Image: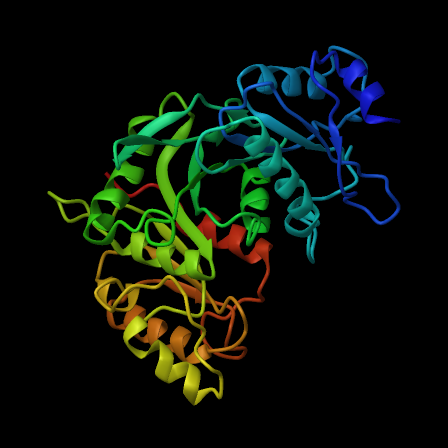
Amino acid sequence: MSPVVLAGLLGLALPEPVAVSQAAKDGSLPIPIFAPARPDGRVVLMLDDGEPVAGLPGGRTGERVRSLVERGCVVAVMGTSGKVDPMQAGDSPYEKAWRGVFSQAQKVLKERGAPGEARLVFLAPGCELADPIPFYRHEGRELMMDVAYHPNAPSRGVVVRVQSGMFGADFVFRAAHHGYATVEIPDPFAQLQLGQEVPAYARAVAETLRRHSKPLNLNGAIAIGGKSKHGYSAGVLGANREAQTDRRLFQAAIVVTDTLDPATRNDDFQAAGIEPPSGSGCPDATFSPFHLVKPGGPAYYIRDAHGRVSRQSRRMIEALEAAKLPYEQSWYPGEAHYVPPSAISIVRFLDKYCVPDPQ
């Protein structure tokens, strides 16, 4: 079915959607993109609600797409129709299948004059998208967060992802399928270069989400995660504390990175026979989860992002053990707390640790 016919069936008064890469080799999972004339910067990557994307007008998928586009979103739809089991063993298609789609969506935003960088939203079946929520003021503009939440499911926590395009997106979709709300925030180091404002930024993220827990059906628990240099940022943000009470802001941190202690990073690379990459975006040792973690902090999920420098992961685990913090890691088979590296392992980690603190 052509994109033009598909748009007609969905009842969308839109320009012709852009047909992009298939999510399945046999071409059975098309991912069309729909866009308003004036998008506001949000890019929604959406899975259908168990019916074909090319369903009859008024179907759930079509109604959701129409509503999101009317609200200013660029929307890409993967028509799985039950063909993808989000909790199956092995890799799901989410990260790789969406990469080309996201690039196309970014071009649409640029062509249509959308402000700022793309704000990525992961919308699993049963999720709704909240209106944009301001959470931090930076260089004269309000930063917005877009929360995808489950209004009709049992209350659960929220997974915050440090922005990194599609890199490491798989665990976010799996968490969303498993009932967690999800939200993406700009990287405070790589994108915003906040420096000494990072603790205030971490507090703003957590406090904003907790203020909105009731209307968004959240239970008050928050996990933060990221991959590569964004995993490093997630580790730093996760270790920060409330300003007045010194209580933890986050219940769990998902840190998929090869940099956890910037002071020893280059030495560890060289000891492993690897030339330290330049332009890593990592600041000085002042900002290091290795030094920031302390008793009463969040649980950590540790994994080397690139399979290169386990010494950095080992240093972080030593710091967590010294602080008596719970952790799981997927880098040292045969050692305590090892779990197989997969997005499913991360969801199980969330189930165990992303729970509300005792009152």
Quarter of the image containing the N terminus? top right
State the scheme by which the image is colored: rainbow
Can residue 213 be spotted in the picture? Answer: no
Q: Position of residue 84 (x, y in %)?
A: 75, 43
Would residue 352 appear left or right of 318 to someone viewing this image?
A: right
Task: Name which residue lies at 19% across and 52% down.
Answer: 196
Name the residue furthest left: 244
33 or 331, nearer to the observer:
33
Image quadrant assignment for residue 116: top left
Would residue 174 appear left or right of 193 to someone viewing this image?
A: right
Is 302 placed above or below 205 here? Answer: below
Task: Name which residue lies at 46% across and 23% down.
Answer: 130
Can residue 84 be spotted in the picture? Answer: yes
281 or 26, nearer to the observer:
281
Total numbered labels: 0
Is 133 placed above or below 192 here? Answer: above
Q: Where is residue 341 in the image (x, y as percent from the top left)?
A: 57, 65
95 or 186, nearer to the observer:
186
Q: Where is residue 253 in the image (x, y as percent from the top left)?
A: 38, 54
Task: Name which residue lies at 28% across and 68% down.
Answer: 290
Would residue 192 appear left or right of 167 to someone viewing this image?
A: left
Quarter of the image containing the C terminus? top left
Q: Position of residue 166 (x, y in %)?
A: 57, 48
Task: Name which residue lies at 33% across and 27% down.
Answer: 134
